[in-house]
Image: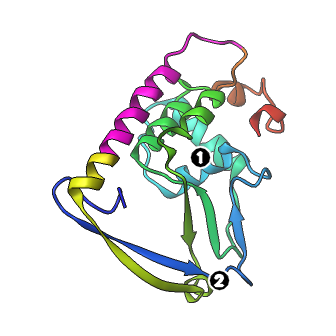
């Protein structure tokens, strides 16, 4: 409900139920996939500020090595992708944030997960259950507070002292860490 309203405008939060039987669902947190798969999906489906040669090379590397073929999947479950998460992803592909710190940052703000419906079959499995009016006075303030806390926590994570054991995008680009390294899981 926090995301349904603007600073000065109420919103609506719809509630749906989905019958998952017969649906093919991609769970990005299943253990089969890493955070690098999630970032690759962001890169492939959202606009990113690719303002350096490192970021451009990183984008190509991630797509070549962590692309997930979505053919046959009706739904995708994964981390929510708000504006803060794009900042974390940009810092990672630019080589300024390690994968360990990215994994910490992605859990900030307790945003939960999103359930993306992507096929006609999945849309047919949705059932509208109702809606709630979201009052901006209450929910926008809660959202701003959560975002401010997450940004402050991110600054603490991002600017921790350098640890040479942490894995960065540069390690992946240089091949000093293999794509199958268990620390990437």
**Magenta span main SS:** helix
Residue placed under numbered mark 1 in the picture: 39
Residue at (60% x, 28% y) in the render? 101
Q: Is residue 122 left or right of residue 136?
A: right
Q: Give 87 or 21, whichever is nearer the viewer.
A: 21
Residue with the most extreme bottom position = 124
Q: Reply above or below: 174 against 159.
A: below
Dot 2 falls on a residue whose secondary structure is loop
* Residue 3 spot, x, y in % from top left: 35, 58
Q: Give 129 or 30, whichever is nearer the viewer.
A: 129
Residue segment shown in magenta? 143-164
Residue at (56% x, 74% y) in the render? 117
* Residue 13 spot, x, y in % from top left: 37, 70
Give the number of callouts. Answer: 2
Residue at (78% x, 50% y) in the render? 31
Report if residue 150 lies within the magenta region: yes
Q: Is residue 51 left or right of residue 19?
A: left
Q: How crowded is mark 1: few (under 14 residues within 10 Å), some or many (20 or more)?
A: many
Residue placed under numbered mark 2 in the picture: 19
Q: In this view, does 103 lie to the left or right of 21?
A: left
CB contact under 8 Å: marks 1 and 2: no
Foreground: disc 1 or disc 2: 2
CA gap, disc 1 to disc 2? 28 Å
Residue at (47% x, 41% y) in the render? 109
* Residue 11 spot, x, y in % from top left: 26, 67
User: Which numbered disc covers residue 164?
Assistant: none
Image quarter (top left, top right, bottom left or bottom right) of the C terminus = top right
């Amino acid at each position: 409900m926090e995301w349904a309203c603007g600073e000065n405008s109420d919103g609506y939060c719809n509630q749906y139920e989905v019958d998952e039987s017969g649906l093919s669902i991609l769970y990005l947190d299943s253990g089969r996939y890493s955070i690098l798969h999630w970032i690759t999906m962001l890169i492939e489906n959202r606009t990113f500020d690719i303002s350096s040669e490192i970021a451009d090379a990183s984008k190509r590397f991630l797509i070549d090595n962590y692309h997930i073929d979505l053919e046959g999947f009706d739904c995708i479950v994964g981390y929510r992708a708000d504006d803060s998460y794009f900042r974390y992803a940009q810092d990672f592909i630019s080589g300024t944030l390690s994968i360990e710190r990215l994994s910490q940052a992605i859990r900030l703000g307790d945003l939960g997960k999103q359930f993306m419906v992507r096929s006609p079959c999945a849309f047919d499995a949705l059932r509208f259950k109702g809606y709630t009016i979201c009052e901006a006075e209450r929910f926008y303030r809660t959202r701003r507070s959560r975002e401010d806390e997450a940004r402050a926590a991110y600054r603490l994570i991002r600017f921790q002292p350098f640890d040479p054991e942490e894995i960065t995008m540069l390690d992946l680009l240089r091949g000093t860490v293999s794509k199958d390294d268990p620390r990437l899981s």
